[in-house]
Amino acid sequence: MNRSIIETLLGAAVLLAAGYFLFFAYQNSDVGRSGKGYPLYATFERVNGLTLGSDVRISGIKVGTVTDMTLDTKTFLATLTLNLKNNVAVSDDTVAEITSDGLFGNSYLALNPGGSEEILKAGDSLTYTQAPATFSELITKFMLSSKDDKDKKESSSPAASSQKDAAPAKP
């Protein structure tokens, strides 16, 4: 009989601990908080890697989430609905850019505030957006920039400049 009381108390303690952890996880997540904040909209050419629930960040700090993604069937552009915290004011010249946490990191939407004093209101759209660069675009830029660097080095080398400055040979 004594053993069953200990097992019962131990089981109750485990259930209380599990309940506490569930409560803690719920409080520190965004589950059930989609109604808090205000919506903004942004239109992009493509939204590679971005998903529902992706972070919206300013200076690396999470200030909201992506709550909806739709395709405009007339323009074939992606329209995102962002839910920003109420205490975050975004100016009308803010640039929205899709980026990632490194080469293989998660994609998120970075907001880069501008200097305007005009603040967007709930339901407004961000005017300035920048789609993510594709891997092939990055490789092409890298290849072209290394070729341009090589050409610049060759044209500014001392041997090339001494040949240009040398007097023509007399016959």
Image (cartoon, rainbow, N blue to C red):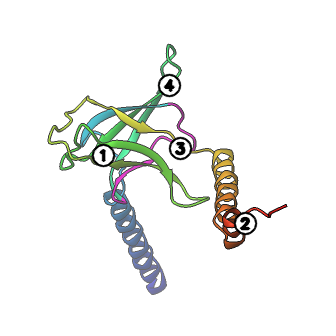
Question: Is 51 contained in the magenta span?
Answer: yes
Pick the residue in front: 161 or 2.
161
Q: Which residues are magenta?
A: 45-60
Q: Amino acid at mark 3?
A: Pro
Residue 151 in magenta stretch: no
Where disc 2 sits, the SS reads helix
State if disc 2 and disc 1 touch (CB < 8 Å).
no
Q: CA distance from mark 1 to mark 4?
A: 28 Å
Residue picked out by circle 2 = 163
For this view, does 116 lie left or right of residue 154?
Answer: left
User: What residue is shown at x 34% (from left), y 64% (from top)?
Assistant: 24
At horizontal 64% and vertical 45% (from top left) the residue drawn is: 137
Label 2: few (<14), some or many (≥20) within 10 Å?
few
Q: Secondary structure at mark 4?
A: loop
- Examine the image and state in which quarter residue 157 appears: bottom right
Whole-number angstrom distance, CA of label 4 to CA of label 3:
14 Å
Q: Quadrant of the C terminus?
A: bottom right
Q: Residue at x 35, y 38 (%)?
A: 82
- Mark 1 / mark 3, whichever is N-terminal: 1
